[in-house]
Image (cartoon, coloured by chain):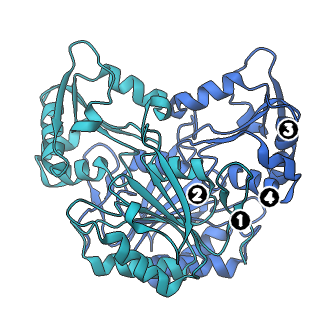
Chain colours: A blue, B cyan
Amino acid sequence: MSEQGRLSIVGLGPGDEQWLTAQAREALRDAQDIIGYGPYVARVPEAPGQVRHASDNRVELERAREALERAAAGRKVAVVSGGDPGIFAMAAAVFEALEFGDPAWRALDIEVLPGISAMQAAAARLGAPLGHDFCAISLSDNLKPWDLIEKRLEYAARADFVMALYNPASLARPHRIHDAFAVLRRHLRPQTPVAFAKSVGRAEEDIVISRLDAADLSIVDMSTLAIIGSSGTRLVNRDNDRPWLYASRRAK
Amino acid sequence: MSEQGRLSIVGLGPGDEQWLTAQAREALRDAQDIIGYGPYVARVPEAPGQVRHASDNRVELERAREALERAAAGRKVAVVSGGDPGIFAMAAAVFEALEFGDPAWRALDIEVLPGISAMQAAAARLGAPLGHDFCAISLSDNLKPWDLIEKRLEYAARADFVMALYNPASLARPHRIHDAFAVLRRHLRPQTPVAFAKSVGRAEEDIVISRLDAADLSIVDMSTLAIIGSSGTRLVNRDNDRPWLYASRRAK
């Protein structure tokens, strides 16, 4: 194994380049191989001599192994994720591949470069809904049973956490958000503020604020991040725009 | 009120400039007034003609009102926070000041610029401990009762969330993390992995991995972020460095 190899797991942030960190920009410029889900690879600025390996959404582990193999062969590799690779993205898959892969990979130079996650971009547009205690739950039941997701939603409601819900719908399972709201409606006040942030930072960005009992869930798709308020979530009305949403610092 | 005024609530990320986003860098360069807690203001690169207003740690609301007043007077104002202003930082204070302040402020041009939060930088150093469902809890009981914090820790343990604990100690209350661990030890397995990340991104950075039953809490101070693993947290040992820590994507 060459000592020159390096694996950088890089967060692109959501949407356009405005949320890219200086550290991520530099790692992308220096990488010889860019590996990731096609739409994320397409967002990386072109650099001379760089090879791009775009793959499908569902092959995280294969992609992780490919990245480790290339780094072990002496390449400077960047695995790219939208958002933060450490939050519902590629970093966990890389470390899983590392744990169960070639023991020699453990000597590799690996670094994780954090990025702005979808919940942070959504929160920034809305005001400060994640300003106090909150949780982040993926509604994807590809790798965990749905009853565990229901249990987490219930405990999160009882803990009075604000919730950021990732993967609220997929093409295969568009109904997840409906099932999640059915749980939440049993535990939270009907007037609990909720928000849906779609494609934040992209041209098709759309933000909707509603209430738990009145939310139109038909707008929720794969590109949506849902935020569920707590008892401390407050709305600040404005004349010519949607209200600001924020988490009161003063809990009851 | 001048139409030229603007209030940007800007996240600097933790530690040095590597984690600053392009958006934040631009807003800092364009601001006429920089407002914030002294050590954060000191981290903003100098720009000609810019006025700096450094204040003490405990005066978030006064600082927020000052920022709104200056923006209302037509100034381009940046309120700066370490990390992400939307996560246990200045953004919630600004919207609280907005809600209870001069109604004319609601017409102001306000934007929140997210940043890398301490838990993301800590997670990046450790591997991918926040790779799946997690919660973020501030242990500060300045504005919420300690029994609410205990309740949230208990529900978070029962939900099997990974936890990121902010403000685990302060000069006035160094014992918070001990009280929190007493709660967690009643609900989680003794061998649950825990990690303490101190001053990530700064010269004095220090990362320690331990277990719930064996952790030395005397190292925890104001600059520490604590991460508590879940049943899915895994360690990947290395010969010449501390283990990687990651959240398994496969829940039990």
Residue mark closest to the camera, 4 vs 1: 4
Q: Residue, x 82% and y 36% (percent of image)?
A: A71
Left or right of A190, for residue A53: right
Q: Which residue is mark 4?
A: A99
| Pointers 4 and 1 within a single chain | no
What x and y, as percent, mark residue A108?
77, 41
Disc 2 crowd, CA 10 A, few/some/many (<14, 14-19, 20+): few
> Mark 3: which secondary structure?
helix
- Amino acid identity at mark 2: Ile
Of all chains, the one bearing label 4 is A
Give residue B248's mark. Answer: 1
- Amino acid identity at mark 4: Glu
What x and y, as percent, mark residue B234?
69, 66
Residue mark closest to the camera, 2 vs 1: 1
Q: Depth check: A169 or B28 in front? A: B28
Residue mark closest to the camera, 3 vs 1: 3
Q: Are marks 3 and 1 in contact (CB under 8 Å)?
A: no
Chain-order first, disc 4 or disc 3: 3
- Amino acid identity at mark 3: Ala
Q: Which residue is mark 3?
A: A72
| Pointers 4 and 3 within a single chain | yes
Of all chains, the one bearing label 1 is B
> Mark 2: which secondary structure?
helix
Residue mark closest to the camera, 2 vs 3: 3
Q: Is residue A26 above or below residue A183?
A: above
Q: Depth check: A214 or B108 in front? A: B108
Disc 3 crowd, CA 10 A, few/some/many (<14, 14-19, 20+): many
Give residue A219's mark. Answer: 2
Give the position of the C terminus of chain B as an image quadrant.
bottom right
User: Could you say which quadrant of the image residue A1 lies in?
Assistant: top right
- How many tags in the picture? 4
Q: Residue, x 29% and y 42% (percent of image)?
A: A240
